[in-house]
Image (cartoon, rainbow, N blue to C red):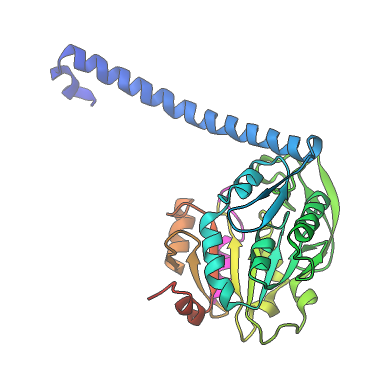
């Protein structure tokens, strides 16, 4: 309460309101600092678990497969079955209807093992060597090695070589300074395209493609236009951040990603507990406001028929 109104209030109430306003103002200053500090602690744990403490542990996850993993905070969530719970539920809903699971950015194989548990043929792409070793150990440990093709490379818009930045296994990126990760750590990585690797294979099969490549998803999609335009449309689970983690503000390819799928006849849903249909007006609103209106940045792109079959719509 401000201006003339406050002089009619009892003195104690005025003092309380002033104190309350001061506390709110202080909290507004402290919260960003707290978030920044928490993220710096996360980055330190990431560096420690990737560059220094390289021991791994093996657990049986609640999802029904064993997992060998290291120190990174995301791995603790995986061990407890708490990693991307909504996304896992969506994948498990669609896997019985699919023939082949393609894991782009497979990391240590959380989703690869999930699909293998359903006895699906899996093609996994993972360029980071520390992740790759855990991925292979997890396949052998679960007896899945005969179900999975592993490609120790990244995917992009065209074949070549690119620098992978960051110490992290889970969050290394082709985007320099992604999410505040230090670009002092980098390694040269071979790159191909999804279209080159798949070619005409599985033309009559139902594919699920999971892409989690820390900001480089549009490049992967540019190298997958033939796969996107297949008559039998794959289901795509895709991480698409708007402002989250991008070093230069908003994702420059945000709208283009959605338009690429819409122009090829796909519909889009949020990968949330209750998936919501995403339309062009929603993307316009999110771009104008700087954020979307739900918690999360993973989306599912699929055919209208599959959306109905998988009960995304009634």
Task: Please say whether residue 142 is one of the residues in the magenta stretch.
Answer: no
Kindly identify the residue that appears in the image at 61 percent across and 77 percent down.
Answer: 98
Instruction: Say which of 199 and 58 sits in front.
Output: 58
| Image quarter (top left, top right, bottom left or bottom right) of the C terminus | bottom left
Is residue 48 in sight in this rendering? yes
Q: Is residue 151 above or below residue 40?
A: below
Q: Position of residue 310 (x, y in %)?
A: 48, 75
In percent of width and height, residue 27 lies at 42, 26
Task: Please determine whether, in this image, residue 245 is positioned above or below residue 100.
Answer: above
**Rendering quarter of residue 5:** top left
**Which quarter of the figure is the N terminus placed in?**
top left
Q: Nearer the viewer, residue 112 or 225?
A: 112
Q: Residue at (79%, 39%) from the top-left corner? A: 55
Please provide the residue range marked out in magenta.
243-262
Question: Number of numbered discs present?
Answer: 0
- In the figure, is residue 274 to the left or right of 306? left
Q: Is residue 245 shown in magenta?
A: yes
Q: Position of residue 24 (x, y in %)?
A: 37, 26
Q: State the residue lying farthest toward the left.
A: 8
Q: Residue at x 82, y 53 (%)?
A: 133
Q: Nearer the viewer, residue 160 or 5?
A: 160
Depth order, front residue of 181/102: 102
Instruction: Answer whether residue 248 is visible to the viewer in this image.
Output: no
Residue sitting farthest toward the top = 11
- Residue 232 x/y as whole percent: 61, 84
């Amino acid at each position: 309460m401000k201006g003339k109104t406050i002089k009619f209030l009892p003195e104690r109430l005025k003092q309380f309101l002033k104190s309350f306003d001061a506390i709110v103002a202080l909290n507004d200053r402290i919260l960003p600092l707290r978030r920044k500090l928490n993220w710096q602690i996360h980055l330190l744990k990431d560096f420690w678990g990737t560059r220094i403490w390289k021991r791994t542990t093996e657990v049986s996850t609640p999802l029904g497969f064993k997992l060998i993993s290291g120190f990174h905070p995301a791995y603790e969530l995986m061990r407890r079955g708490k990693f991307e719970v909504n996304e896992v539920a969506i994948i498990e809903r669609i896997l019985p209807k699919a023939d082949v699971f393609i894991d782009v950015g497979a990391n240590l194989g959380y989703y690869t093992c999930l699909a293998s548990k359903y006895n699906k043929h899996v093609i996994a792409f993972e360029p980071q060597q520390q992740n790759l070793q855990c991925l292979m150990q997890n396949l052998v440990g679960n007896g899945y090695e005969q179900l999975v093709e592993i490609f120790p490379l990244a995917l992009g818009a065209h074949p070549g070589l690119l620098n992978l930045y960051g110490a992290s296994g889970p969050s290394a990126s082709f985007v320099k300074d992604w999410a505040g990760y230090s670009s002092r750590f980098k390694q040269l990585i071979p790159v191909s395209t999804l279209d080159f690797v798949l070619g005409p294979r599985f033309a009559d099969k139902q594919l699920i493609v999971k892409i989690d490549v820390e900001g480089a998803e549009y490049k992967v999609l540019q190298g997958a236009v033939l796969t996107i335009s297949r008559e039998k449309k794959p289901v795509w689970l895709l991480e698409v951040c708007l402002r989250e983690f991008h070093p230069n503000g908003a994702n420059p390819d945000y709208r283009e990603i959605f338009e690429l799928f819409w122009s090829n006849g796909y519909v889009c849903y949020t990968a949330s507990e209750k998936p919501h249909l995403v339309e062009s007006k929603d993307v316009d609103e999110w771009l104008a406001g700087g954020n979307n209106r739900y918690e999360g940045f993973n989306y599912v792109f699929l055919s209208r028929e599959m959306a109905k079959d998988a009960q995304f719509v009634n």
